Image: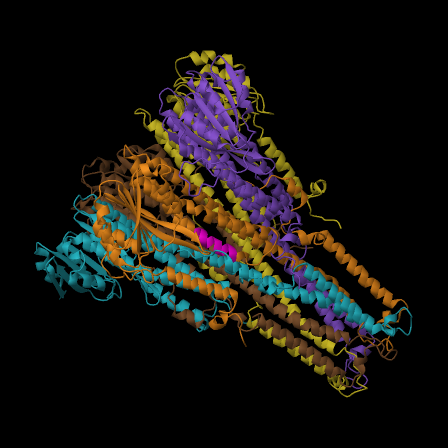
Chain colours: A brown, B cyan, C orange, D purple, E yellow
Amino acid sequence: MAKMATSDEPAERKETPIAKKVHRKRKRTALRRRRPQTLGLAPGSITAVPGAPPAVIRVISYDADRVEERPIARVSDLKSLHDRRTGVSWINIDGLGDPDTLSQLGEMFGLHALALEDVVNLHQRPKFEDYGDIDFIVLRMPSLSPHLDLEQVSMFVTDRFVITIQERPGDCFDALRDRIRNGKGRIRQRGGAYLAYAVLDAIVETFYPVVESYTDRLEETESRVLANQTENVVAEIHAVRHDLRALRRAVAPTREVLASMARTDASDPQGDTHIFLRDCHDHTVQLLEALDTNRELASSLMDMHLSNVSMRMNEVMKVLTIIATIFMPLGFIAGLYGMNFDGDLSPWNMPELRWRYGYLFALGAMGLTAIGLVLFFRSKGWLGGDAHEGNQGSEPEEARPSAGAK
Amino acid sequence: MAKMATSDEPAERKETPIAKKVHRKRKRTALRRRRPQTLGLAPGSITAVPGAPPAVIRVISYDADRVEERPIARVSDLKSLHDRRTGVSWINIDGLGDPDTLSQLGEMFGLHALALEDVVNLHQRPKFEDYGDIDFIVLRMPSLSPHLDLEQVSMFVTDRFVITIQERPGDCFDALRDRIRNGKGRIRQRGGAYLAYAVLDAIVETFYPVVESYTDRLEETESRVLANQTENVVAEIHAVRHDLRALRRAVAPTREVLASMARTDASDPQGDTHIFLRDCHDHTVQLLEALDTNRELASSLMDMHLSNVSMRMNEVMKVLTIIATIFMPLGFIAGLYGMNFDGDLSPWNMPELRWRYGYLFALGAMGLTAIGLVLFFRSKGWLGGDAHEGNQGSEPEEARPSAGAK
Amino acid sequence: MAKMATSDEPAERKETPIAKKVHRKRKRTALRRRRPQTLGLAPGSITAVPGAPPAVIRVISYDADRVEERPIARVSDLKSLHDRRTGVSWINIDGLGDPDTLSQLGEMFGLHALALEDVVNLHQRPKFEDYGDIDFIVLRMPSLSPHLDLEQVSMFVTDRFVITIQERPGDCFDALRDRIRNGKGRIRQRGGAYLAYAVLDAIVETFYPVVESYTDRLEETESRVLANQTENVVAEIHAVRHDLRALRRAVAPTREVLASMARTDASDPQGDTHIFLRDCHDHTVQLLEALDTNRELASSLMDMHLSNVSMRMNEVMKVLTIIATIFMPLGFIAGLYGMNFDGDLSPWNMPELRWRYGYLFALGAMGLTAIGLVLFFRSKGWLGGDAHEGNQGSEPEEARPSAGAK
Amino acid sequence: MAKMATSDEPAERKETPIAKKVHRKRKRTALRRRRPQTLGLAPGSITAVPGAPPAVIRVISYDADRVEERPIARVSDLKSLHDRRTGVSWINIDGLGDPDTLSQLGEMFGLHALALEDVVNLHQRPKFEDYGDIDFIVLRMPSLSPHLDLEQVSMFVTDRFVITIQERPGDCFDALRDRIRNGKGRIRQRGGAYLAYAVLDAIVETFYPVVESYTDRLEETESRVLANQTENVVAEIHAVRHDLRALRRAVAPTREVLASMARTDASDPQGDTHIFLRDCHDHTVQLLEALDTNRELASSLMDMHLSNVSMRMNEVMKVLTIIATIFMPLGFIAGLYGMNFDGDLSPWNMPELRWRYGYLFALGAMGLTAIGLVLFFRSKGWLGGDAHEGNQGSEPEEARPSAGAK
Amino acid sequence: MAKMATSDEPAERKETPIAKKVHRKRKRTALRRRRPQTLGLAPGSITAVPGAPPAVIRVISYDADRVEERPIARVSDLKSLHDRRTGVSWINIDGLGDPDTLSQLGEMFGLHALALEDVVNLHQRPKFEDYGDIDFIVLRMPSLSPHLDLEQVSMFVTDRFVITIQERPGDCFDALRDRIRNGKGRIRQRGGAYLAYAVLDAIVETFYPVVESYTDRLEETESRVLANQTENVVAEIHAVRHDLRALRRAVAPTREVLASMARTDASDPQGDTHIFLRDCHDHTVQLLEALDTNRELASSLMDMHLSNVSMRMNEVMKVLTIIATIFMPLGFIAGLYGMNFDGDLSPWNMPELRWRYGYLFALGAMGLTAIGLVLFFRSKGWLGGDAHEGNQGSEPEEARPSAGAK
């Protein structure tokens, strides 16, 4: 006997849409796992990330008066920059394909080997580590393209340098670069800590549209659940929840990073960057609140959906019961008078068959039975309006205060 | 084949009541999202809120002896007020449509750019921030009109000035203004901190009737669930839960705001406003407790509702089973004697049909079968009182201690 | 079509027992809400509680040597007492109907206006507030009469005075008064703090029988659930849970009150009342533990109940399936030989009808079908003992260690 | 109509096994509640525990060189022991029937009245209290006989005396007494604090076999759930959960007791008993972890069980649906040709009945219908292996890594 | 009547695959419990672990310049090593069969008796204990072979010695030993604390592939749930959850161990090992996060699975209802005209049977009934696409952002 839905036929499974999705997702997950083979290596070893694009270095140097921007081919080109005594330099590296670039950079700027190992290990959660003069920060930069992607961004911050290292080209810093070029805002007057804040702020801002897209998806799902539609609801909620958890895991430690940085800066009598960091910290708190709201909404939708499923089942069962309960007695009566007892042999054998109004009598008995059962069902409240019993709003509902808050 | 409930027909969906509600809610949500396009702007930029009403400025100045009230057309009119050395002034701004007003105000009173940015960003959670001489407070003011609305109210507080900025005209401060005008209570003898407390207290008081209206809705739902009614229960609980979450998100950080303010004031040897703030803090704790009680009640109602649904299904199934189980054997007997085996050809072919009391024998067999099955069902406890098995209270219930506490 | 269970017929609903209960409960809730109309009043305003009984004042004054007890008609009669320099006086006020009494009292003893406002606002959660020389304590005193009632009791405590203010006459302090009169125990040797402890202890003791009555109700419900009875279980658990939450909200902050008081007293080098307060604190911890146990028991009962409902449904479905599955094939066979194909016209038309043993052949086919199906069901384990599959204990169960702990 | 399952017939209920169990349990619970009638008594009053056995006193005195053991008839016999200046004495009292014994003991050793009241109040949770020179400890000693019993053990500890007071004879200290007698281990060299630790350690060790017996019960239940058996599973899990909660309530505060004692001892520069207490503390942490694991296992089993119930219901419904869906159309065809339209009067009336192969045509129609429906069900995956769909392990399962950890 | 699924036939149960698995698991669990019979022994007693392999000792001694490796037959052979003044020695013991070896070792190196007792008691949770000069660490080393096994590894750490004691041969330290032999990395320059870190790091690294294998199992289960397959899903999730809990219990206290060690080292002005320990601590945080993600995924899968089961039941019920509801009325009509009322005796008795088009009329009535019911079902949305209503992805789903994050 062939089984359509067993796991013995993986080849066949691939052809359904759902299987295709699962398949693609697997590939994605496998991609994400491309972490260097560090098992058994000494701590602090930097290895290439398999399949990562080669490193591209870009530098923006600025002080209050001037901005200089140039691409860098080799790390050694950064030497003159490193020796300069004034201004702030933002060194951005896209791509983790060249472990040599990172180790040369580490040597030139005195970056700790464990920090550099973290840069190429793509499983970091956002964190802030204090290596003496140099702060090391890891963050996650979200994008929807169209699947949620949380690119790892590492930063080394000193007074005069900010080094940002991204997994691949493409980021959310263009507006920030424009602000530096145009000299708008405070950024040109400030040092590396403020630039680090500006980078952080740009990343945190990027979470807003991403989180809102999930709010949109949930609200669309909500309208479908309220309209009593059940297709794909569970899989959709499952997918959204998965991404919300991933976002939470990215945002919650980012909040800790900002709190740590604000604390560090606040202990410096001259700094006032902590006021900005506190503002950015508030944004992460807002994001977490939005994520929690979405998570609770997802749970509530799941409950509603399951209740809908039960309600529908109830309705189906009622229809079945009503029909079966009415027609079984009727069918029985019909069957009764379909018996072949021989009335010729005995007056006791089905005399009704020989009555003048026997047929009408039988029809009447059927009719009375049916009417009695209908009245019984009505007394149970099983008839009338039950089809709309799910979640459809009635008029009084309209006038009540309802969900409209933030 | 036409599907009545698929998502392919959005146009059609709008015409059902539930769809209308969803539609309206969407518009509302979209409205709430009207936050300025700050993405990529320098931190501290003040932009107009799309669709916000223009700013209307009102000032009440008072000291122990006199009260002065006047509308203000331009921010520059506040200059003389700002230079005065005595008394307290309450500057109230309704409407966020004029970013210029805010920035002029910020310049005159030395308000921090990040705080002003927060004023026009309508996603703030309640918070208390200390900018040196000036305290910055954000709150949420609830209203039911008829949907829950949590208007953002921002406050700047110094010894001599309280600046409140609301999203739009209409607020809960009229009784407070009357108290200032009439010189009742302590308010005319005190400074800006006490006025700030009075504003906060007025806002916190406003939450009481709002929270109570949700308690009422839940109690109405409770009485419907206890009466075994199932229409709209899930959607109603879903909506109430959503609003309770929104209220909780507004009240919980307000409690923190009040705790922070009380701590700040308590460290001032002369102030005694912290006693009043502690009282107001207790109110927020009461509100949170009421919200939690409501949330738990909502969960409990959901459980009861789902149990009701199961119970009803059980009842439906029992009716079906009883009817089917009784009439199937009867129908079988009837069918048996409806067979056309030819008794003329063989004495073994349905001799019952030729018995004198064959028909009565068949009826008797049917009757005995029916009685046996009814006894079987009775022994299972499936008959008798099952229709009332849901949640209807029986007499002993009445005499027991029951839910009547706070 | 008439609907029996819609919300359109409130008048009709009132006549069922459940509706009556709901109705009564509503009235009760409304009663509880009788808080003064303070919205918009200056903080610290004392207003009458609507419908509250008039204030009745009773005083017990004592020191180590003597006890004096007298009713007081007016607050001014307390003047001499207030001026006395020795002994302890316990002023008890029953009834909140006279705001003047409270304000005069406040003036004479220097009670803070906000504390007095809390006395008449019947939504206080238990709390301990330190107003310099005077401590202000709010508690909840439980009673079952027969519904749970948590009366608000306010206390002002100084070295020489304890003022207790109750919502209405009737309390749990008679044994304490007797101890004062008889001079038993330490109470006559101690000051106001010890008297305050004794009052607190009396209130906390009162919670024990109340909590135990809910344990009894839950155990009765447990025995019903274990005996597979389903009537009212959900409503009963719902009601008990509601009251348990109310009790928890009363006891948990009482624990904090006691901890605060013990901390205050422990910092006094001479006091040893903190040892007694710590003992009382332990009692609240015991109570909370008992409440938590009951709450978990309620959840577990709900789970069992729902599982019972599912089990019963399963059983019902099995009976239906067995009956339907046996009689449908039999009925089909009977129907087959009830067909009227004309055997006279063709030897291919139902020759069985003309067989000598045709009828016996048909009966045999039916019998074999039935036996085969019964064997099939037996192989599924659907027959035999299924009626007892719910939760009835079998013999091995008896010998096992089982739930008998605290 | 008689109801088999209502609560109106308690007399009848007693005769079923489950009712017997419930009945016995009630008696047990009532027994546990035998606390003295302290309501209204002055704090520190010692009253007899109703039904408690009389007190039996045993003393072991020892120092490094010698051991003396003797039964004591009256408390006054302890006088000489109390006046001695060296060695350690362990006074053990079994039975709480004599309040006088306790008060004499309290007088002789200076035990606080509140502590003695706690000794006879059998609702104490484990706690550690510091009364100056004397430490007061309450613990729970578990036993399975066969129901879980958590006997209250109180201890007073000074440098030279350890007084243990148990509810009734029988304890877990025999191995400890042997160690004292034989002089094995450190115990004879140490003081009262170490003896107290040894007593504590003996009690904590006693929890291990008790907790493991619950692990065994759960694993047995697990094997039954995995084998898809459903009898008694819910009641069994309910009972185990109840006892696990009771054990948790006994062990968790014991951990706090040990932490407090270790902290006290660690502040003493000479003591090293805190190392032993820390070890014992670790044991309570292990026990709590085992309890949590069991609790989670119980939840998981409940989930699996409910899923099994659903799965079985699904299977039952499928059988019903398959049978009904096949035989209804067949029965309809049979019924069709059982109609009595008179073919003699009209050629349009059921000409099939007169066809030569009419009967075979009808049988063929039935066969095709049946085959078509079977193919339809097969395409749904409803046939084939469904009976094994529950939780039975398939071969691949065997090869996978699976639950085998601690 | 034979019961297939009762617990009365344990012998029979063993023959099914699931019973075999359970049986094997039991044996495994029993094995794990092989802890020494310490009940009643003095604390600090070292006893043999039943069934443990004999101890095998291996030593690696090294300093910056040289490495020496040798097997040791007796503990006394370690004497020379112990007396040496320079370099670091790593003494590894596989197997707990010889309590004498441990006690000799304890004597030679001054290990505390309680620590040695913990070594042979295989229920330790990971912990860090400070015994003056010697640190005692317990860890769990995971392996899949193929069942999850969490071997207990104990470590004693001083400046110059690291003693590791494992339950049995086979470990994850080969790469570390090679690094010591080859002099790669920092390890040869550092002391015992760094070696201890390296061992810890090796163990923590070993958790990564184990945790990932569970992620793989869950993702495989996810794809099966999404493809609407239900076999073994519950048992698989149950097993994975069990192991995830065991892993969590192993990793969470390991994090605490690392935090304690980092704190200890950070207080040493010369040490910089705390930077490495912090890195390793971050790894445990990552592991915990992965475990939590998996746990949430397991819960979500369970929800989806249960929803699938409900959905399928719904579908089955719909098919049954549609078939029954269509054929019951048809069958009734057929039965009606199968009645044997004698039309010869009365014109009122079933005149239809004598109509010319009576049969066609009856067929027409049946056809209209069927069409009407099909239209009714279509209006309910029960037809069309319902078979795909489960969780299969539709095209629009493809284009949406979906679960692809870390």
Image height of E252 relative to B180, above or below: above
Check the image and report above or below for A342 versus B392: below
Q: Residue at x 47, y 44 (%)?
A: C290
Whole-percent x, y for residue D4 in the image = 65, 58
Near-viewer residue (A202 or C279): C279
Choose between D248 and A114: the one closer to the eye: D248
Q: Position of residue D83 (x, y in %)?
A: 42, 18
Name the residue at the bottom extreme: E347
Q: Which residues are magenta?
A: C235-245
Name the foreground residue: A125 vs D221.
Answer: D221
Residue C42 image point, x, y percent = 22, 58
Main secondary structure along the magenta-highlighted residues: helix
Residue in the picture at 11% in, 57% down: B63
The answer to whether D323 appears left or right of E271 in the picture is: right
Residue E25 among magenta residues:
no
Relative horizontal placement of residue A190, taking residue A253 as reference (left or right):
left
Q: Is residue A34 visible?
A: no
Locate residue A254: give its quadrant.
top left
* Image position of A356 (left or right of E222): right
Question: Would residue D111 be found to the left or right of residue B44 on screen?
Answer: right
Does residue A132 appear in this view? yes
Expressed as whole percent of the image width and height from the top left, the position of residue A315 reads 57, 67
Q: Quadrant of residue C204?
A: top left
Pick the front one: C353 or D15: D15
Q: How many marks?
A: 0
- Residue in the picture at 51% in, 33% down: D96
